[in-house]
Structures are given as structure tokens and as C-alpha cells.
């Protein structure tokens, strides 16, 4: 018998979906660990102080959570009239950890990364397992790989994970939107009235929060709800009547957000008149230019890793993955809609923290569309084989999942090759490597130590006027802005400026 080649033996190596899922989850945990450890050096800045000023005063005077909530709602009501209408976003920004002490600010990356990971995993497990009919490990594999791309390639991790005021308004609200979409899917598929009632209540609350959140997540949620209602109405689905309550709650909330008097006051600050047609043209230009920027080697590697997983999972599913072209067109519409709010108000793709969640949305939609296309091809192959030979089992030979794991190590090797060990600028700026660099170089510790020296001066009751030292380092993941006036005002000091 001819001896089998080494390559032939390697091709026969197989790993179960569950094992691959565990390994990928462990790899994601390794990548996230330095980001969480870096959080111990995180410090508040800019609007953290502005939004916490009255709330902190309420906490110091009463040490009552009810008083804190009362002060936060009062602040939301005031800003709703004079600044902006996103009331639920304003409420979250008003309830920051700075209120309870500067040490609590280290929790910010834990909150944001946990929300992003939990929201993404929940959405993928719901969509892939409940709708596409694939196994939960396969669904989580897709979620973990998507999260790796989102976390490692996010355009501005500082504003997405480490700055509370900006990240809770965008990253956290984006994560809540994924939770809402997953729960809406479960509501449609629920079989008992008791379960539908419970899911309707939760979805209604989240719908109100989304309607009063940032305009990017709000617009996408509006389109998702409209599409879902239209589909249920066409099919005369019994879940339609249950869906009306969260849809109505969202519509009322979003309308209140859009019609707030503070929005007009904010628009008056711009030197141009908003133009809807110009905004659409800009959104189209942005969606193509930024998509070409983001579709690089890491994304292609993950697509290659996902292909065998999706193929194998879809071969065992009864879902037919119909109309992939329509799914891609719908995803493109959602992606383009993300640019519309900032294109309308600012003639740009918005501040970096907004740009971050547009990136998250693009990566998520791209990965879902890719899996759907592979699933459609697998479903066609499944039907073809069944028609040709009824004796052929519907389950194919297990896919070589080690390819998926090897691909992750290849991606990590690519990351190691782009460290700060050389004098050349890295091809890719990976978030975890940036965190490791900040920790190892000491720049994060120096940044935090300078903040502590500022606090000693700002909390000295004998000092009324202060001159704050400049930060000796500005770590890419921690530094957002250094508006000293806001910081001095928060501690009741007069700032001496050069």
C-alpha cells in the first residue's frame, strides 16, 4: 500500500465545532486581556466632567442613588431643550462612573468591551441558530471572528472603549441595538403567548432607549423595524400584533428625539444649511470610500476562515438561504444609512466615536452577508446531491476546522509582525498591540501618574487657582482630549493659563 503523504494526513485532521469555538473564544480573550488591563490607567476627560458636575454634587450632598437619578433626569430635561434631543443617550452620559470617584473610571473599558462582545454574540447566536438553523458553536465562531476584526481594527479605540462620555453614547448604544434585534427575532419565533408577552415588554423598553439614543443607531433601528413589520404583514404572521407595541414605542421615542427644541439650537451653530440630497450623495461617497479602506488583508483572512465553517454548518441546516442578492442590497442600504445623520448635519462621516460604530456595523453586515452567500451555495449543493443520489447522506464529511484555527494564528502572527519593535510604521494598527506597547513602555503609567498629581492639586482646599501640568505622554488608546478648563471647573478651581 502506498504510503500516504504528510499533506494528505494533515488534510484528514479534523476538529469539532465545539472545540474550534472554545479555541477561538480563548484567542479572543487573550486579545481583549491587555485592553482590560490597560483600563487601570484610564482617566476622565472633557465632557466627562461637564456631564458629571451636577450629578456628582447630588451624590456628595446626599449619597442617595435616587438623588443621583433625579439630578440626571433634570440635566436631561435641560439639555433636551437647549442642546440635543437624544434623551436616553444624555441620561447614560449623565450617569458616568466619575460621579462616584475617579477610581471607578477604570471600569469604562470593561463596560464597553463587555457590552460589545455580549451584544454581538447574542445577535449572532440568535440569527444563525434560530433563523439559519446552524449550531450554536458555528454561530459563536462567526461572532468571535467578527469581534476580533471589530476590536483590533476599530478606527479610534480610545473614543470607543476608554472615554466614557463618547463610548456610552455610541459603542454601548450600538451594543444595545444588537440586543434589541436579537430579541425581536426571538419574539417573531416565540411559540407561546407568555414568552411573546415577556419579550414584547423587554423589546418595548429597549425600543424606547434606541429611539432616544444616537441618530446612527436610531436610523438603522427604524429601518430594521420598518422592514420587519412589512415582512410580517406580507406573510400575515401572528407575531405582527405583538410587534406593534415595541414599534409604536420606538416611533414615539424617535419622533420625540427628532423634534426636540435642542436640535434646532444645535443646528444653529453650523455655518451651512443642512441639505437632504447633498447628504445622500455624501453618504454614497462615504460608504464606498470607507468600505474599500476597511476591506484589507485581516478581513480577507477572516472570510477565508469562515467559509469552511459556514459551508459545513449550512449543509446540515434546513434553511435554504433564499435571495442572497436581496440580502446584500438590504445590508448595503443599512450601511449607507449610517452615514446619513452626520452627512446631513456636519457634511462629513462624523466624529471618530460615531465613525467607530459605522465601522462595527460594516464589519458585522459584511460577515453576515458573506456567511449567507456561502450558506446559499451550500444549500444549492445540498439539494443537488440529494436529487442525484437519495442514498447520499445529507451530512457531508466534517470540515477541516483546523484551517480556521490555523488562520487565527496566522492573523496573530501578522499582528506580531506589525509591532513597535521596528522603526517603520506598522501596516495595520492593532488595538491589542497598542495596549501592550503602552503597558510595556510605561507611557500609560506616566499618563495616569500625571493625572494623579493634578488631582492632588485640584483637591487641595487651600488652593483656589491652579496651573495644571501637561501630560508627559499621550497614549493612543487612553488620550482623547485635554481641555483643562472643564477639569478645573469640575473641582471648583480657577484655571491659570499661560
Image (spheres, rainbow, N blue to C red):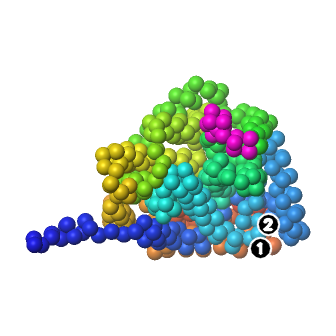
Quadrant containing the N terminus in the rendered view: bottom left
Q: Which residue is mark 1?
A: 460
Coordinates of residue 365 in the picture (x, y in percent): 50, 46
Q: Magenta includes 231? A: yes
Q: Which residue is mark 2?
A: 464
Quarter occupied by the C terminus:
bottom right
Residue in the foreground of this view, choosing between 89 and 383:
383
Q: Nearer the viewer, residue 93 or 22?
A: 22
Q: Quadrant of residue 39?
A: bottom right
Specify whether 484 is left or right of 362. Answer: right
Residue neighbourhood size for the residue with mark 1, other residues' Cα within 10 Å, grouped as few (<14), some (14–19), many (≥20):
few
**Residue 330 included in the magenta stretch of the image:** no
Measured as percent of width and height from the top left, residue 32 is found at 51, 68
For this view, does 298 lie left or right of residue 36?
left
Q: Residue at x 58, y 24 (%)?
A: 277
Residue 439 in the image: state x and y as whole percent. 49, 73
Under circle 1, the secondary element is loop
Can residue 202 be seen at all in this image of the molecule?
no
Residue in view at x 59 percent, y 62 percent = 118
Q: Is residue 56 visible?
A: yes
Residue positioned 56% across, 70% down in the render: 36
Residue 492: x %, y % from top left: 80, 63
Amino acid at each position: 500500500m502506498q504510503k500516504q503523504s504528510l499533506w494528505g494526513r494533515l488534510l484528514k485532521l479534523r476538529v469539532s465545532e465545539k472545540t474550534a469555538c472554545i479555541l477561538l473564544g480563548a484567542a479572543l480573550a487573550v486579545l481583549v486581556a491587555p485592553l482590560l488591563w490597560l483600563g487601570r490607567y484610564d482617566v476622565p476627560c472633557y465632557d466627562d466632567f461637564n456631564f458629571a458636575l451636577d450629578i456628582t454634587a447630588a451624590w456628595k450632598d446626599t449619597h442617595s442613588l435616587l438623588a443621583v437619578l433625579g439630578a440626571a433626569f433634570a440635566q436631561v430635561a435641560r439639555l433636551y431643550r437647549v442642546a440635543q434631543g437624544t434623551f436616553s443617550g444624555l441620561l447614560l452620559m449623565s450617569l458616568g462612573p466619575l460621579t462616584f470617584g475617579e477610581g471607578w473610571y477604570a471600569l469604562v473599558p470593561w463596560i464597553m468591551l463587555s457590552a460589545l462582545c455580549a451584544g454581538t454574540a447574542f445577535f449572532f447566536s440568535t440569527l444563525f441558530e434560530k433563523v439559519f438553523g446552524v449550531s450554536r458553536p458555528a454561530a459563536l465562531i462567526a461572532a468571535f471572528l467578527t469581534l476580533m476584526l471589530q476590536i483590533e481594527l476599530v478606527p479610534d479605540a480610545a473614543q470607543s472603549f476608554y472615554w466614557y462620555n463618547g463610548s456610552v453614547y455610541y459603542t454601548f448604544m450600538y451594543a444595545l441595538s444588537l440586543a434589541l434585534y436579537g430579541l425581536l427575532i426571538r419574539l417573531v419565533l416565540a411559540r407561546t403567548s407568555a414568552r411573546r408577552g415577556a419579550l414584547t415588554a423587554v423589546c418595548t423598553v429597549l425600543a424606547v432607549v434606541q429611539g432616544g439614543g444616537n441618530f446612527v443607531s436610531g436610523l438603522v433601528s427604524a429601518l430594521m423595524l420598518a422592514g420587519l413589520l412589512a415582512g410580517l404583514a406580507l406573510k400575515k404572521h401572528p407575531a405582527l400584533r405583538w410587534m406593534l407595541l415595541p414599534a409604536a414605542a420606538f416611533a414615539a421615542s424617535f419622533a420625540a428625539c427628532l423634534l426636540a427644541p435642542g436640535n434646532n439650537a444645535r443646528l444653529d451653530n453650523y455655518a451651512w444649511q443642512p441639505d437632504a440630497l447633498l447628504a445622500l450623495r455624501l453618504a454614497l461617497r462615504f460608504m464606498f470610500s470607507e468600505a474599500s479602506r476597511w476591506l484589507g488583508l485581516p478581513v480577507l483572512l477572516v472570510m477565508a476562515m469562515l467559509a469552511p465553517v459556514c459551508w459545513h454548518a449550512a449543509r446540515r441546516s434546513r434553511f435554504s438561504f433564499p435571495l442572497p442578492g436581496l440580502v446584500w442590497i438590504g445590508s448595503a442600504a443599512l450601511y449607507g444609512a449610517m452615514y446619513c445623520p452626520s452627512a446631513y448635519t456636519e457634511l462629513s462621516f462624523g466624529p471618530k466615536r460615531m465613525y467607530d460604530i459605522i465601522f462595527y456595523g460594516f464589519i458585522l453586515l459584511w460577515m453576515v452577508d458573506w456567511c449567507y452567500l456561502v450558506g446559499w451555495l451550500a444549500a444549492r449543493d445540498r439539494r443537488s446531491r440529494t436529487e442525484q443520489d437519495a442514498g447520499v447522506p445529507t451530512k457531508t464529511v466534517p470540515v477541516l476546522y483546523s484551517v480556521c484555527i490555523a488562520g487565527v494564528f496566522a492573523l496573530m502572527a501578522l499582528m506580531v509582525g506589525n509591532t513597535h519593535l521596528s522603526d517603520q510604521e506598522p501596516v495595520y494598527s492593532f488595538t491589542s498591540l497598542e495596549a501592550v506597547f503602552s503597558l510595556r513602555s510605561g507611557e500609560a503609567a506616566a499618563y495616569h501618574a500625571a493625572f494623579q498629581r493634578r488631582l492632588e492639586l485640584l483637591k487641595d482646599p487651600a488652593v483656589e487657582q491652579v496651573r495644571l501640568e501637561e501630560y508627559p505622554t499621550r497614549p493612543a488608546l487612553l488620550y482623547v482630549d485635554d481641555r483643562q478648563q472643564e477639569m478645573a471647573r469640575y473641582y471648583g478651581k480657577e484655571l491659570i493659563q499661560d
